[in-house]
Amino acid sequence: MNNMKILLPNVLFFFILSGPVIAEEWKLGKNSDGISIFTRKTDQSSIEQFRGTVKIESSMAAAVALIQDMDSVQKWIHYSKSGKTLTKNGKSSLTYTITNLPWPLNNRDIVVNNTLTQSNDGTVTIKFEGAPDSYPVTENMIRIRKLTGDWVLVPAENHMVSVTYTVLSEPGGRIPSWVVNMGIVDQPFITLQNMRKMVKNSPWKEAVIAGIEER
């Protein structure tokens, strides 16, 4: 019994020290054209998490309107083929998107719960999380089952908005993780490039959204 009393704390101490690391430090993967892309490994997926940052000339409403416009995702979100809003309730929505991956990979689809909030300083956060069982599975499509992330929009000087786009996901199917990780920076980089251009165009630049305050 005495030996067990000595052994148990030592075993617990070992597991505390050797337990999985939640996430590594962010590493800069690309810094070009005013856009910075960071990646890091986590214990939640073999696919690296990415984070992209950029400043765009935009109102807060225009940026939010573009992100919420599911009919236009194929115009600016890299790899997106089409999208639609399934349900909308106030500042929450359920959306469906089809991704158009290069041959020989099969296309993927994803169902996502989105929740928008705005803090007192004007920062808008749109959190999104996969809801794979909330919509029927489509034939010949691989359903992405793991996804978490957010858009964080911070008002800046001179009619600018600081955008941070963070995603952790797994594409599903039989794609080796090292293949996905090799090109992980491309999706956020091209997406943020497109976003910066799109918000200056109609109808998004004229958008006014109830409940979204400008700073």
Image (cartoon, grey):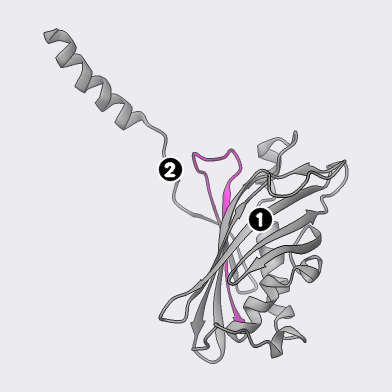
Corner quadrant of residue 181:
top right
- Contact flag, marks 2 and 1 (Cβ < 8 Å): no
Horizontal and vertical percent position of residue 89? 62, 68
Nearer the observer, 211 or 74:
211
Residue nearest the viewer, comparing 68 with 31: 68
Assign the N terminus to one quadrant of the image.
top left
Q: At 70% across and 81% down in the image, what residue appears?
A: 199
Q: Position of residue 179 (x, y in %)?
A: 71, 41
Amino acid at pointer 1? Val
Q: What's the magenta region? A: 39-57
Q: Is residue 178 above or below residue 30?
A: above
From the image, tell me which residue sits under label 1. Answer: 112
Residue 159 is at least partly visible in this image: yes
Query: Residue 103 placed where, x, y %?
Result: 88, 45
Q: As shown in the figure, which amino acid type bears the numbered disc 2?
A: Ile
Q: CA distance from mark 2 to mark 1?
A: 23 Å
x then y, percent, for residue 195: 69, 74
The kind of secondary structure element at disc 1 is strand
Going by the image, does 46 lie left or right of 196?
Answer: left
Q: How many marks?
A: 2
Disc 2 marks which residue? 22
Determine the residue positioned at 70% across, 87% down.
205
Q: Is residue 99 above or below residue 115?
A: above
